[in-house]
């Protein structure tokens, strides 16, 4: 751990080489990346971190704005004496990655944004409020308000046993009122977030990755990001919903690993 404004932040480091920092989605923790540790730390220095109100990091006592998480990332860089790194963020983590890239541009070598967006739209705000209302009830209500919109209907059908098995250990976590209170603060931290007019300031090579069937973050939002970040590429994973890290895990890992590690290539169109 290291201390940020008097609060302990949990992080993990694996392997050596080019540094990749993976930023969690809102419901995730470092434990969520277990299956990715071996492949992504092969030839790389992989850093996982629980942001404030996540996993093993300290819980907040009141409301805050999402950009504080970007300051946590910067504090981690200072703690580890990392001058620059490749930052990959999934969903909520992608929003934090955007704010980190804008606030600390010299720190970012390459940027990867999975299933994320550049603002908290009225659509996302209302979905977040529906989660908050379910969180006031119990873990099962919260589970049923979150999981169906995260995964595609096809994944629900084909991988129903996996989802059912996963529910057996997810529900006890969701039943914890401390967890649900933290998720509510995390959800509310994104209210008012909007960097759409600043995307052109991002100069780091950027990869935007979408799920074709993402019901939580519409592809149009991700297309917008790719169009406004000049040095960017946009990949759409066919048949995948919002949960690309589980629904298209091989493609997810391959895109991240390849984009981070491929040397700079200059193309001539003349």
Image (cartoon, grey):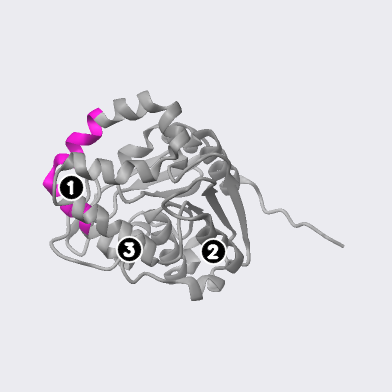
Q: Is residue 167 left or right of residue 256?
A: left
Q: Which residue is mark 2?
A: 225
Secondary structure of the residue carrying numbered label 3: helix
Quarter holding residue 230:
bottom right
Q: Are marks 2 and 1 in contact (CB under 8 Å)?
A: no
231 left or right of 65? right
Which residue reaches farthest bottom?
Answer: 197
- Checking the image for residue 125, the label placed there is 3
Residues rendered magenta in the picture: 168-184
**Residue at the spot of label 1:** 179
The structure residue drawn at horizontal position 52% and vertical position 58%, both measured from the top left corner, is: 222
Q: Is residue 172 magenta?
A: yes
Crowdedness near tag 2: few (<14), some (14–19) or many (≥20) residues, C-alpha within 10 Å: many
Q: Nearer the viewer, residue 161 or 67?
A: 161
Q: Nearer the viewer, mark 2 or mark 3?
A: 3
Mark 3 → mark 1, Cα distance in angstroms: 20 Å
Q: From the viewer's perspective, is residue 124 above or below residue 1?
A: below
Relative to 187, residue 38 above or below:
above
Asked if residue 15 can be seen in this view, the reply is no
Q: Is 139 in front, or is 36?
A: 139
> In this view, which residue lies farthest toward the right?
270
In depth, the one of 267 and 228 nearer the eye is: 228
Q: Secondary structure at mark 2?
A: helix
């Amino acid at each position: 751990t290291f201390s940020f404004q008097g609060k302990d932040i949990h992080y993990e480091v694996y392997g050596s080489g080019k540094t990749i920092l993976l930023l969690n989605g809102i419901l995730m923790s470092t434990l969520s990346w277990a299956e990715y540790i071996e492949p992504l730390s092969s030839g790389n220095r992989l850093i996982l971190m629980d942001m404030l109100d996540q996993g093993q990091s300290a819980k907040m006592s009141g409301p805050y704005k999402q950009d504080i998480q970007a300051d946590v990332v910067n504090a981690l860089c200072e703690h580890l004496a990392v001058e620059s790194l490749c930052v990959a963020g999934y969903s909520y983590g992608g929003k934090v990655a955007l704010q980190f890239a804008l606030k600390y541009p010299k720190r970012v070598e390459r940027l990867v944004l999975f299933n994320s967006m550049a603002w908290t739209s009225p659509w996302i705000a209302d979905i977040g409020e529906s989660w908050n209302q379910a969180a006031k009830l119990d873990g099962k209500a919260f589970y049923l308000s979150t999981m169906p919109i995260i995964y595609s209907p096809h994944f629900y059908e084909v991988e129903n046993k996996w989802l059912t098995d996963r529910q057996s250990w997810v529900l006890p976590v969701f039943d914890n009122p401390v967890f649900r209170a933290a998720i509510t603060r995390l959800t509310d931290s994104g209210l008012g977030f909007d960097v759409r007019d600043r995307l052109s300031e991002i100069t780091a090579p950027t990869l935007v990755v979408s799920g074709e069937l993402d019901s939580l973050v519409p592809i149009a939002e991700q297309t917008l990001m790719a169009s406004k970040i000049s040095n960017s590429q946009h990949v759409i994973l066919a048949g995948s919903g919002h949960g690309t890290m589980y629904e298209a895990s091989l493609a997810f890992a391959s895109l991240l690993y390849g984009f981070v590690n491929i040397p700079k290539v200059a193309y001539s169109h003349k």
